[in-house]
Amino acid sequence: MTQPARENITRLLLDWSGGDEGALARLFPLVYDELRLMAQSHLRRERSAHTLQRTALVHEAFLRLVDQQSVNWQSRAQFFALASQMMRRILVDHARRRRTAKRGSDPVRVDLEDVPDAADADWDFEEFDRLLQRFEALEPRSGRLVELRFFGGLSIEEAAAALDISVATAKRDWTLARAWLQRELERT
């Protein structure tokens, strides 16, 4: 995405925060393709027969974002970070509903490709979410970084911008997170 397009998204978010409802209508077409890529990244880690489609995930996340009353929109990075968080919540809720509806069925599996030596292991989505919540309780910023990278598909630079930290700090946090997650995953 070009710099003017990024700045336009930020401008529309600021206008929307200021009460301009028309800004929301102009914002959606600008962010739609990127939200679809983010949703694709989330769904790539889901089981192959997942019933939630990419478009539905994008629309549900966007509707939840629009419904946020207490957010003071400040940047494109903030918007996409919150979108990633919304998509994660939607997928976790979807997995819980599926598990509740089909007791005893196979658990939803996630491929944790960004943790060393875990690429060939299958992980239960709900269990990974619980594990990430434990990590976030210990290291909130690093936990958010994992969420942005793993679920949001953001680069280290984009995640650093969303968290308002330096790229070097993000890289250190990423190294810490990967080591902790690898250790915990090996215990399960």
Image (cartoon, rainbow, N blue to C red):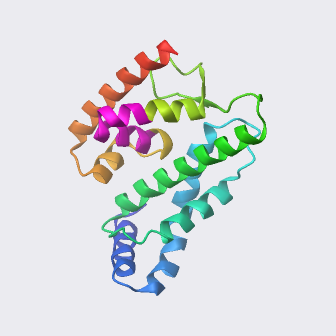
Residue 131 or residue 77, whichever sits in front: 131
Residue 6 or residue 83, whichever sits in front: 83
Q: In this rendering, is residue 53 above or below 23?
A: above
What residue is at 35 percent from the left and 47 percent from the top? 159
Q: In this rendering, is residue 9 above or below 83?
A: below
Q: In this rendering, is residue 117 above or below 83?
A: above
Q: Name the image quarter holding residue 17.
A: bottom left
Q: Name the image quarter holding residue 20.
A: bottom left
Query: In the image, 164: left or right of 26?
Result: left
Assign the N terminus to one quadrant of the image. bottom left
Q: Name the image quarter holding residue 71.
A: bottom left
Number of marks: 0
At which x and y percent is residue 62? 54, 65
Query: In the image, 124: left or right of 133?
Result: right
What residue is at 61 percent from the left and 47 percent from the top? 93
The range drawn in magenta is: 133-149
Q: Is residue 147 magenta?
A: yes
> Magenta region, mostly helix, strand or loop?
helix
At which x and y percent is residue 59? 62, 64
What residue is at 31 percent from the left and 37 percent from the top? 142
Residue 22 or residue 137, whichever sits in front: 137
Query: In the image, 143: left or right of 117?
Result: left
Query: In the image, 113: left or right of 139?
Result: right
Q: Is residue 8 magenta?
A: no
What residue is at 62 percent from the left and 40 percent from the top? 44
Q: Residue furthest top?
A: 187
At which x and y percent is residue 132? 44, 33
